[in-house]
Image (cartoon, rainbow, N blue to C red):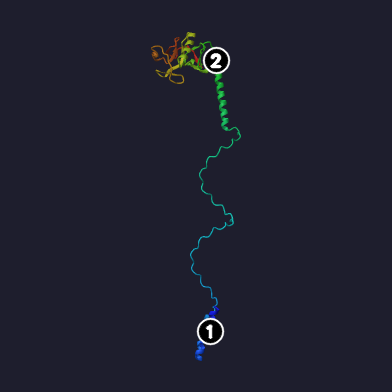
Amino acid sequence: MFQLLTFCALVLCASPATTPAQQVIQTWHRNACSLVVCAPAERGLPGTDGRDGLQGPKGERGEPGLHGIRGLQGPPGEIGPTGAKGDTGPQGERGAIGQTEVNLMKNQVTALEGQLKALQASFTKYQKVATFPGGRIVGNKVFITSGYEGNFDDLKQRCQQAGGQLASPRNSAENTAIKDIVVLYQKSAFLGITDIQTEGTFRYLNGETIVYSNWQAGEPNNDHNQEDCVEVYSSGKWNDKSCGEKQLIICEF
């Protein structure tokens, strides 16, 4: 740079030697301007920013920053799917007796009371059989007579007062037991069977249609339209009979 400035100064200084005085002054002024141009310029004001350049390549991953402050708790999320069934836990201690167990114990006591009553009833039956020689036992039934005779309504009431009912055989074994009593006393006996409700349809005293019968040949015939009750002969056969007749009492317990 210093050599260039020296060269310019030499060129400008050589021009006045060959020109008139006035031209020398004008030329010197022009060359002086040229001399100023050749001198180093001062730094100007900063220019405006240029356009953005192309994006450079992605840099390497930096180090993780410090943990920020914990934020507020967000709203509850949706319910997730049901998880797998867990293992069975240890058995707990036995708790106090619950209402179900109390009720069960009450039911057991009630059942025992019922059995006791049944035993007492059976014992009473055997006592009655021992009291009356004309007694017979068939299964859970006891057939007893005191030898008393009366019409159907009288005998039915007496058996009810004693806690039983007129003998009502439901099979051949029970009918045979009743027949044996009739044979012993040599008297026909009324059975707890009638067709008072519907003629020709014989029923037990509870209204149930009979499930067993042992009629004498030609019976029942409802002689004179007055035979609504049933008597049993010493043969064990049945005959329809007027309810007003007197027959042997045989009660069933």
Say which of marks 2 and 1 sits in front: 1
**Which residue is at the front of the view, 62 or 131?**
62
What amino acid is labelled 1 in the image?
Leu
Please tell me the numbered disc located at residue 95: none
Crowd rating for badge 1 (residues with CA inside 10 Å; few <14, some 14–19, many 20+) = few
What amino acid is labelled 2 in the image?
Tyr
| The quadrant where residue 119 appears | top right
Q: Is residue 39 left or right of residue 188?
A: right
Q: Is residue 87 left or right of residue 229?
A: right
- Provide residue 111's location: percent of width, then percent of height: 55, 25
For disc 1, the marked residue is 10
Where 43 sits versus 114, above or below?
Answer: below
Where 21 sits versus 137, above or below?
Answer: below
Distance between mark 2 and mark 1 Cα atoms:
170 Å
Label 2 residue SS: helix
Crowd rating for badge 2 (residues with CA inside 10 Å; few <14, some 14–19, many 20+) = some
Quarter of the image for the N terminus: give it. bottom right
- Provide residue 79's location: percent of width, then percent of height: 51, 46
**Which residue is at the front of the view, 166 or 245?**
166
For disc 2, the marked residue is 126
- Provide residue 167's location: percent of width, then percent of height: 48, 15
Label 1 residue SS: helix
- For marks 2 and 1, the one nearer the N-term is 1
Q: Residue at x 51, y 89 (%)?
A: 17
Where 142 sits versus 26, above or below?
Answer: above
